[in-house]
Amino acid sequence: MSNKFRTFIEKYLTRKIGVEIKCCLMFYMVLCFYASYRLICGFESASIFYMLEMVLLAYALCWVQMLIGSDFDDVDKLSIKECAVIAGAAAIYSLSSYIFCWFEKNFVVSLIFAAYMILAYLGVFLIHKIKRVIDARLLNTDLEKFKQREKKEN
């Protein structure tokens, strides 16, 4: 296998895995809101068809975000671009919830859902930021241990 092809495959898989993880996370966030809404309204069941719409929408939005270069969970600070992407995605989720009747075309619930999705995106950003700080600290600790081991061996 050529080095260029291998590099291409590695980059593709890295992006694909990132999108899959984000898709699962965002679908889970949407599903939690939907399930909570259903329980509050006194229903003990949920539509599998709606769940299919939710997961397909999450998957599409995650790919679009990756393709436009808005990988906001890999940045240290949210710029105007990332904030616009978050607001746009929340608006798309909310509009879709209204169009597809996830909340019985209740406009207020769809607006609450939009606010919830903004908070979900901000939470994901914060979790990734904290994880990067922890990973950096662990890598620095490992590097120091490696340097000390090198000094002892020489």
Image (tube, helix red, strand yellow):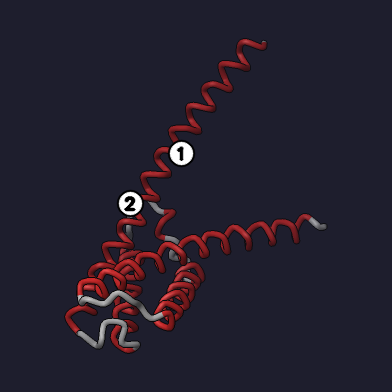
Q: Label 1: which residue?
A: 135
Of residues 23 and 11, which is closer to you in this image? 23
- The quadrant the N terminus occupies is bottom right
Tell me which residue sits at (57%, 20%) in the image. Answer: 147
Disc 2 crowd, CA 10 A, few/some/many (<14, 14-19, 20+):
some
Q: How many marks?
A: 2
Could you say whether the residue bearing mark 1 is in a helix, strand or loop?
helix
Residue 75: give x, y in percent of width and height.
40, 53
Instruction: Single out the residue that lies furthest toward the right.
Output: 1
Tell me which residue sits at (36%, 56%) in the image. Answer: 124
Q: Residue type at mark 1: give it.
A: Asp
Q: Work out whether residue 133 can be spotted.
A: yes
- The quadrant the C terminus occupies is top right
| Above/below status of 6 relative to 85 | above
Asked if the residue at tag 1 contacts the one at tag 2, i.e. Cβ–Cβ closer than 8 Å, the answer is no
Tell me which residue sits at (49%, 60%) in the image. Answer: 21
| Above/below status of 29 relative to 126 | below
What distance separates the C-alpha of mark 2 from that of mark 1? Answer: 14 Å
Of residues 127 and 7, which is closer to you in this image? 127
Could you say whether the residue bearing mark 2 is in a helix, strand or loop?
helix
Q: Earlier in the sequence, mark 2 or mark 1?
A: 2
Disc 1 crowd, CA 10 A, few/some/many (<14, 14-19, 20+):
few
Label number found at residue 51:
none
Q: Residue type at mark 2: give it.
A: Leu
Of residues 125 and 108, which is closer to you in this image? 108
Splitting the image into 4 quarters, where does residue 14 fall?
A: bottom right
Splitting the image into 4 quarters, where does residue 2 fall?
A: bottom right
Of residues 137 and 68, which is closer to you in this image? 137
Q: Label 2: which residue?
A: 126
Residue 23: give x, y in percent of width and height.
46, 66
Horizontal side, residue 149 vs residue 36: left or right:
right
Tell me which residue sits at (47%, 32%) in the image. Answer: 138
